[in-house]
Amino acid sequence: MAIQFTDACVGCGACEAQCPFGAIEIKDGKAKNTAACTACGACVDVCSVGAILRVEEEKKVEINKADYKNVWVYMEIAGGKLRNVGLELLGQGRKLADGLGEKLAAVLIGENAGALAQEAFAYGADIAYTIEGPEYQHYTTDAYTAACEDLIKTYKPSVMLFGATNDGRDLGPRIACRIGTGLTADCTGLGIDEATGLIAWTRPTFGGNIMATILCPDHRPQMGTVRPNVFKKPERVAGRTGERIKVPGKISAADIRTKFLQIIDACTGSCNLEEAQIVVSGGRGLGSQENLKLVEDLAEAMGGMVGASRAIVDAGWIDALHQVGQTGKTVAPKIYVACGISGAIQHLAGMTSSDVIIAINKDPEAPIFKVADYGVVGDVLEILPLLTEEFRKLRQEKI
């Protein structure tokens, strides 16, 4: 940001008196700023004739884009295993890499990350960059940012994908700032722009009413975070191999400003919605918080997990960890049951990838029925107990 004085200045001196740094002087009847100016903008606000402007200073960073090759996927590791979001991105990354005529690489950072390289190869990676060490036992912003920054500056990828998870949303933007590139957040679509050959990043905007496609023509790598469950996990190919590149970590424990103490399970597997095979979600049509018990009972009977619309999360009926939708979690279970949910576009954005959608609503015109495979028009408070009873009978028969 810079401050610019225009010819409209009348030399009244109001800005000179207002400047807290004494960085303005009047010469030849016009105000001018000196080297002491910090661009704080105090003078802009006090100028009565609008003669002082804030001007964005564009920093041009010249890079040779031909030096940047290959599509990278940051692989999240939890409990010694690769998280599904990374595997999903390997599938889409494979398509991008093939379309660009480049290789697909997995980035694995962790205490024993190398042990998972073969799994990354099985899901489509050609290369696995691994950084190991006790400093990477648990995710920390400092350690993982430094590791990724060093990798990018050394090996120069053209594209880098992150999951739009807690870790990915923390790590991706920080790396983009360090490298000096852009980042498109919360993408729901990836492709290659035919006219430019650039990655076309698609994300919802204006409350999900518009889908924006964003290109990054001037900087590298092209980076973005992608919502979990937007893409299907590719088939695992046993025995598939690739090139593992071991990269030494360059950070010490003293460089990490946060100290890991313990993991507290604020929510157990009951709200690990992203990887659930069956999700039963409740909405405002339940009428009250007490009736949410009907959704919980059906989820238990079906062996599923409980989801929720934003409306009942905002009402305080259930924790936000259960929220499905544009501002919550994106799920893609085999079966999704929407109970008393009208089907606002923001909710649909988080569950339309489900294999089978069952909707229960007393309003036959509810938008949820337009995406449902099966619909039940009726009172959710009457239908849920009947469904729960039948599923419990089925489970009992199997025992």
Image: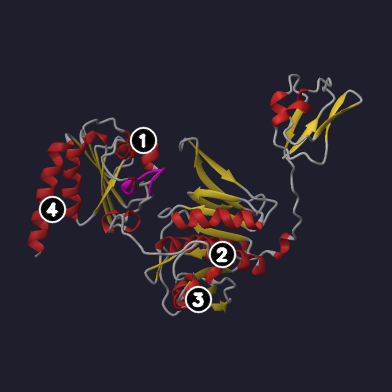
Of 200 and 131, which appears nearest the observer? 131
Q: Position of residue 33 (x, y in %)?
A: 82, 34
Alpha-carbon span between mark 1 and mark 4: 28 Å
Q: Pointers 1 and 3 in contact (CB under 8 A)?
A: no
- Relative height, residue 179 to residue 209 (above, below): below
Quarter of image, res 2 = top right
Residue that label 1 marks: 344
Q: Nearer the viewer, mark 1 or mark 3?
A: 3
As drawn, the label of residue 391 is 4
The reply, left or right, for residue 151 in relation to residue 393 is: right
- Main secondary structure along the magenta-highlighted residues: loop
- Check the image and tell me how it is coloured: secondary structure
| Mark closer to the chain start, 4 or 3 | 3
Q: Amino acid at mark 3?
A: Gly
Q: Nearer the viewer, mark 4 or mark 3?
A: 3
- Which residue is disc 2 drawn over? 72
Label 4 and label 3: CA atoms lie apart by 48 Å
Q: Secondary structure at mark 1?
A: loop
